[in-house]
Every structure is written in C-alpha cells, then in structure tokens.
Image: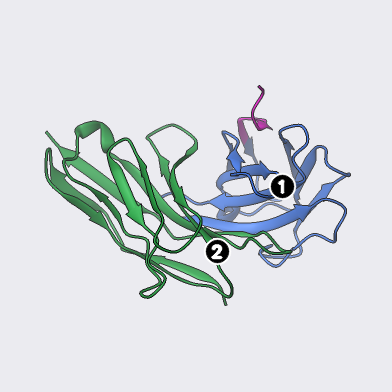
Amino acid sequence: GAGVSQSPSNKVTEKGKDVELRCDPISGHTALYWYRQRLGQGLEFLIYFQGNSAPDKSGLPSDRFSAERTGESVSTLTIQRTQQEDSAVYLCASSQFGTDPSFGPGTRLTVL
Amino acid sequence: GDSVTQMEGPVTLSEEAFLTINCTYTATGYPSLFWYVQYPGEGLQLLLKATKADDKGSNKGFEATYRKETTSFHLEKGSVQVSDSAVYFCALRLMNRDDKIIFGKGTRLHILP
C-alpha cells in the first residue's frame, strides 16, 4: 500500500519567508510525528499528534514553528520568518498504536 | 526524562570486521526498542526491534538484545560489508498514552573495502 508521503521533496527559500511542509500519513494511522534532522545530526523530535488528543508540542524549537493536523489526515508544519539555522531535512512518520512507525522520504529545506 | 544515548561516530571498520554500536536508554515503564538505518540518500528504515526484556531482534545479519538490567540495546554484526555503510539510529517507543518515539543522535558507519 501507499506509504507516508511528504511534499515538497525540496524547498529553497529566502531568509524571512514563511514555508509550509506537508505530510500525508498512511491511511488509518492515528499517530503522526514530525522530526528535524540537521546535516550530520540526529533526529530531533518536533511534535506528535495522536488521534484527537492535544498534540505534544514539546519539541518545537520556537514560536516560529507550528503544526496542524485535522483528525487523522494530512498534517502541515509551518515555519514563519525562516532563519538559516532552520535548514534541515524535515521527516514525518505515522503509526497505528502497536505498529511500527513508517517514515516519509523527508523534505529538504534550504534557507538562503 | 526519557532518552537514548548511543556511541558517537563516525565508526570506520574494514570489511568483514565485527561491529558493535552501543545504545543505552532511560525510560519510565517498559519501552519497545528499535534500530533504524539510513543509507546514503535514502529515507529512514526500520532495521530491527525488540518489545520486551531479553528479546532479540535480528535482520540482515544484525542483532540486538533488549537488556533490561543494563538498560541497553547494543547493535552487533559478525561480519560487516561495504553496503552496511550508513547512519544507524537507536530509538525507544513509550507504549503508553503518549506513544512518543525518542531517537539517539545516530552513529555514522563507514566500511572500507
């Protein structure tokens, strides 16, 4: 079946612009995660959605970052007033409780 | 808080060498443990997992045993190949209400022919 998809695959933007990254989870997966991976670094947790519960936003690095998810569908991660340190690969994953999470291919964000 | 610590890389080995990548964790409750692999230019893939103490996960010649007494999940392979060159991530999943997945920082592995 279809896996987790993310769009765009690559995004180049200028410092100060806003960007939106999209994640389409596997159908029926109630949990959705966003991670950030800076060049040569590990995975940094950003935010976690589980069904209709309040999201765990504890990993968002600043108030410039926000994410939304409606029900168990698509999620968007928005970064406002982008900075060069936001350059990274943004990974999305989804899972059903008790199943292994599946990762998307990521969106590579470059802030000039 | 809950966390995963894995050995820093890069780790460079010759082909057919024995590999160990150490991973220890701190968690409340009884997490499931995972190793993920990221090959150059590719996405993150699940390599193996273990869901309870003393379980051994294995795949592609790699093994890891869930050691509750030492809170460890070290990754091993008896004879590495050039194609094993990748970044390896240890992770835990809290199988509770939060169901959060926490990753280590990753270990880059280079295998020389």
At label 1, the amino acid type is Leu
- Read off the residue under disc 1: A32
Image height check: is B31 above or below B56?
Answer: below
Q: Position of residue A68 (x, y in %)?
A: 83, 49
Q: Determine the chain carrying the residue at label 1.
A: A
Q: Position of residue A110 (x, y in %)?
A: 57, 41
Report if residue A51 lies within the magenta region.
no
Give the colour chain A carries in the figure: blue
Q: Quadrant of residue B41?
A: top left
Q: How did the renderer colour the structure?
A: by chain
Give the colour chain B carries in the figure: green
- Read off the residue under disc 2: B31
Report if residue A4 lies within the magenta region.
yes
Q: Is residue A37 visible?
A: yes
Q: Position of residue B104 (x, y in %)?
A: 45, 60
Left or right position of A35 against B81: right
- Dot 1: few (<14), some (14–19), or many (≥20) neighbours within 10 Å? many
Image height check: is A102 above or below A39?
Answer: above
Q: Residue at x 66, y 22 (%)?
A: A1
From the viewer's perspective, is the residue at label 1 or at label 2 nearer?
2
**Which residue is nearer to you in this view: A3 or B110?**
A3
Over which residues does the magenta segment extend?
A1-11
At label 2, the amino acid type is Pro
